[in-house]
Image: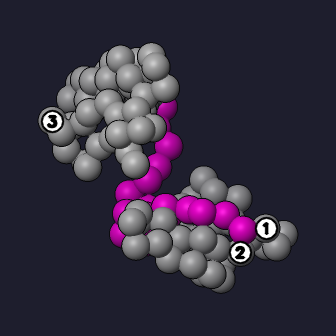
Amino acid sequence: MTYPFHPSFGQDLKVVRRYRQAPVVCVVLSDGTHANLPCWMFDPVYCGSVSLCKQATVSLAALNRLRSIVDRQLECSDGGQSITNDGDDRTTECRTANDAL
């Protein structure tokens, strides 16, 4: 675990499952429980760039993207709908449970 803000930071964790559909692995934590964690938490290059700073900063583009995602989720919240997204915000659509079948 190379993500410095996770309680298991610095520990070797046993991977018990890898998922094809998502960049996530299931690992056994030191207390014996299983946890699904994103793969980037094990990437020393990515996690090496993570640090604390006195004042948090977020780009305007990231905030606009978040706003867009939240707005679409709110639009989909009526009638038992959920959001589907293939990673491209332009293709996000609302689908009911029946549409997914």
Task: Say which element carries label 2.
Answer: strand
Upstream in sequence: badge 1 or badge 2: 2
Q: For residue 4, which quarter of the picture?
A: bottom right
Picture disc at residue 90: 3
Q: Nearer the viewer, residue 18 or 1?
A: 18
Q: Which residues are magenta?
A: 34-54
Residue 14 location, x and y as percent? 65, 83
Q: Residue furthest left?
A: 90
Q: Nearer the viewer, mark 1 or mark 3?
A: 3
- The quarter in which the N terminus is drawn is bottom right
- Find out whether residue 45 is within the magenta segment: yes
For the residues labelled 1 and 2, say whether their Cβ atoms are less than 8 Å apart. Answer: yes
Quadrant of the image occupied by residue 56: top left
- Identify the residue at horizontal 45%, vertical 16% (top origin): 78
Q: Is residue 40 above or below residue 54?
A: below
Q: CA distance from mark 1 to mark 2?
A: 6 Å
- Whether 92 is drawn above or below 10: the answer is above
Answer yes or no: is residue 42 visible: no
Q: Of residues 50 and 61, which is closer to you in this image?
A: 61
Q: Which residue is mark 2?
A: 28
